[in-house]
């Protein structure tokens, strides 16, 4: 007996305990069965849902396979995604044109505001966009949730108007997929739709759809390519037939022994037959058309050596027995043993050319006689030409003289233009010199009056009466104050100094004018070009001082032998032109420097610049953009001639609206002074 069971229990009690134990066991089994049945029901629901999904997917596949309109396929698929997969928004991108540079939206569906529809319809994804890099590397899809921080993915949340999205490639991905599918949800409505996730279960439905859609896209591409190829083949055949029938050159094919296998209408027309059939029926072999049978043998030999022969000229008989020159180009097709199987040829009617050649030959013979006669006539005319040449030399000499006069007139015109400015510059110092001298005259008169008073006072001071002396001194002090003797004594030296300064300025202006014109030295002299530019600046200062700030950047340059008067004319023209180029105000910069055996001088302004279309003409004589009466068009032409005379160069660099720079290069010359320029 077990220790845990009381010895006084009856057998009936044991049976009841056993039944209770069995009942508890059965209860546990029933609970497990009920739980298993619940699991089975859940599995059945999932299976039913999957079956329904597969059925709907199958129906979609049937509809997509029933059409070859890719946009209809996209629209049907978009409706399926919205209704069955329950994403809020669907976008299809298309890239079927080989010349396209990216993907453009073709179909989009789902809930969008009106402004969102307009924005998303214009979205384009470039082929080289980093956004597509993972797909180019072989990724199956692009995945972006609301918290994504990858820049290239996060940027497209705003562009796609989706806060979370999945992007799948559709069709072959070599080199790029033909289309893209994007599904997702907006930020405000995401919680009401199927959330974007990269879990296997969440991707199952969209993954199955993408597989079927990829197949439909590839079928469409294959069909489109096949239709395109067939259409191109039809066009090529039609084009070839049109060329064959309508080309003006004859096209033919013969056997190796010359039997016609076919020809186009132009061949029959060239040889005088009514039609290709008439030619093939009438002529057993092309050999009988050759006027010289040896030419057929020569052609056959050339084909054996080179396979093709071009521009082979031969004379042939026509149907009516007349002769006609033709030019043949042929190509032979060879068999495995090196034998000619057939010959393709092209004929051109050159009868007119041959007749022209014969006529030209006859004409040449006649021309030889005419040339001999003409030669004799030309010998007679040469004597007249030599006489005319002498007259032309005299006219040329007069023209050169006139040109020299024009150059001198232009120089005198420039000097005349500057005369008013020089007069203005001289008048200023002369004016205040005269004013100071007038004041000095009045001061002197007062000093003389005071001196007279002093003389009288000195004579009267000898009076022994003391009161009289005091009175005289008071009178003298009064006269000093009245005549302002103390002020005159302090101011008279200042007036004299200013007068001297004014006269020195007049002297300098006259000297600069003398240096500028070089009236007394019109020949080559050793010259400091920096000083020459400075002298010219003083002369033209009145022309530019009211609107130009002049910057001098003189470098250390060697003394060179040149005609300073002519170069001063160059500097004058460039400085005046620079001042005229400034609209209201601006800057003129003068730079000089030396490189090797050359001196460089650059004149820059911040004016209106020179348009490119006239920049090449500015050195032409009489070319000017100024109004009538304000310029002769000779200034820059004379400048160019003077620089060339000094064996130098002048270049211009200009940008409209920013300014112009003229750069002069002059070789450094040393030698005896006095040589004519």
Image (cartoon, rainbow, N blue to C red):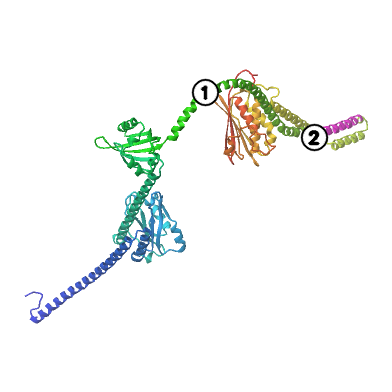
Q: Tell me what residue is drawn at x 9 percent, y 78 percent.
A: 6
Q: Please tell me whether residue 458 belongs to the stretch shown in magenta.
A: yes
Magenta residues? 436-459
Q: CA distance from mark 1 to mark 2?
A: 95 Å
Question: What secondary structure is marked by label 2?
Answer: helix
- Mark 1 and 2 residues: CB-CB less than 8 Å, in contact? no
412 within the magenta span: no
Which quadrant of the figure has residue 620?
top right
Residue 459 appears left or right of 513: right
Which mark is drawn over residue 288?
none
Q: Which residue is mark 1?
A: 369
Main secondary structure of the magenta stretch = helix
Residue 253: x percent and y percent?
Answer: 33, 40
Report the quarter where the N terminus lies.
bottom left
Which residue in the protein does label 2 denote? 435
In the visual, does 127 lie left or right of 49? right
Residue 511 on image: x %, y %: 71, 26
> Where residue 577 sits: x, y (%)?
64, 35
Helix, strand or loop status at disc 1:
helix
Q: Is 28 in front, or is 167?
A: 167
Residue toward you, 675 or 626 = 626
In the image, is residue 63 above or below residue 410? below
Query: Where on the picture, by quarter, is residue 53?
Result: bottom left
Between circles 1 and 2, the one closer to the viewer is 1
- In this image, 19 relative to 366: left or right? left
């Amino acid at each position: 007996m077990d220790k845990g069971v009381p010895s006084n229990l009856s057998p009936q009690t044991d049976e009841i305990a056993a039944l209770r134990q069995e009942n508890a066991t059965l209860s546990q089994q029933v609970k497990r069965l009920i739980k298993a049945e619940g699991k089975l029901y859940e599995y059945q629901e999932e299976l039913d849902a999957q079956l329904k999904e597969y059925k709907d997917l199958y129906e979609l596949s049937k509809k997509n396979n029933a059409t070859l309109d890719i946009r209809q396929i996209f629209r049907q698929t978009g409706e399926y995604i919205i209704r069955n997969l329950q994403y809020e928004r669907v976008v299809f991108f298309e890239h079927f044109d080989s010349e396209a540079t990216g993907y453009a939206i073709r179909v989009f569906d789902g809930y969008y505001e009106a402004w969102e529809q307009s924005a998303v319809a214009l979205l384009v994804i470039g082929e080289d966009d980093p956004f597509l890099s993972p797909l180019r590397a072989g990724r199956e899809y692009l995945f972006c949730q609301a918290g994504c921080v990858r820049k290239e993915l996060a940027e497209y949340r705003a562009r796609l108007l989706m806060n979370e999205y999945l992007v799948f490639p559709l069709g072959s991905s070599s080199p790029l997929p033909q289309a893209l599918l994007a599904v997702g949800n907006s930020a405000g409505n995401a919680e009401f739709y199927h959330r974007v996730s990269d879990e296997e279960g969440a991707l199952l439905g969209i993954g199955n759809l993408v597989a079927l859609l990829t197949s439909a896209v590839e079928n469409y591409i294959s069909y489109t390519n096949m239709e395109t190829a067939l259409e191109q083949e039809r066009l090529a055949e039609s084009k070839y037939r049109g060329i064959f029938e309508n080309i003006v050159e004859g096209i033919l094919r013969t056997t190796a022994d010359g039997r016609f296998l076919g020809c186009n209408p132009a061949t029959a027309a060239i040889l005088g037959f009514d039609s290709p059939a008439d030619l093939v029926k009438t002529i057993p072999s092309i050999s009988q058309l050759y006027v010289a049978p040896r030419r057929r043998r020569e052609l056959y030999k050339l084909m054996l050596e080179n396979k093709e022969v071009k521009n082979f000229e031969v004379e042939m008989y026509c149907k009516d027995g007349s002769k006609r020159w033709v030019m043949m180009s042929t190509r032979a097709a060879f068999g495995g043993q090196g034998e000619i199987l057939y010959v393709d040829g092209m004929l051109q009617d050159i009868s007119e050319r041959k007749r022209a050649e014969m006529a030209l030959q006859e004409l040449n013979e006649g021309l030889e006689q005419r040339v001999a006669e003409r030669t004799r006539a030309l010998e007679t005319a040469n004597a007249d030409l030599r006489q005319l040449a002498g007259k032309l030399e005299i006219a040329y000499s007069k023209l050169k003289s006139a040109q020299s006069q024009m150059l001198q007139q232009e120089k005198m015109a420039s000097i005349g233009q500057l005369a008013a400015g020089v007069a203005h510059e001289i008048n200023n110092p002369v004016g205040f010199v005269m004013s100071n001298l007038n004041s000095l005259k009045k001061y002197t008169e007062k000093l003389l009056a005071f001196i007279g008073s002093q003389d009288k006072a000195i004579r009267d001071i000898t009076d022994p009466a003391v009161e009289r002396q005091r009175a005289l001194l008071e009178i003298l002090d009064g006269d000093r104050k009245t005549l302002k003797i103390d002020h005159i004594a302090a101011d008279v030296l200042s007036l004299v100094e200013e007068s001297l300064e004014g006269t020195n300025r007049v002297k300098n202006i006259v000297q600069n004018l003398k240096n500028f014109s070089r009236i007394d030295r019109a020949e080559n002299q050793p010259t400091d070009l920096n000083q020459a530019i400075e002298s010219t600046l003083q002369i033209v200062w009145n022309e530019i001082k009211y609107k130009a700030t002049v910057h001098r950047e003189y470098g250390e340059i060697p003394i060179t032998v040149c005609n300073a008067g002519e170069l001063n004319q160059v500097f004058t023209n460039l400085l005046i032109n620079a001042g005229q180029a400034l609209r209201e105000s601006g800057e003129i910069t003068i730079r000089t420097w030396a490189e090797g055996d050359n001196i460089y001088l650059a004149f820059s302004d911040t004016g209106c610049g020179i348009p490119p279309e006239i920049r090449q003409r500015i050195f032409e004589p009489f070319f000017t953009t100024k109004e009538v009466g304000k310029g002769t068009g000779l200034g820059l032409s004379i400048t160019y001639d003077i620089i060339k005379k000094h064996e130098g160069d002048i270049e211009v660099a200009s940008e409209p609206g920013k300014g112009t720079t003229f750069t002069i290069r002059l070789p450094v010359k040393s030698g005896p002074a006095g040589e004519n320029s």
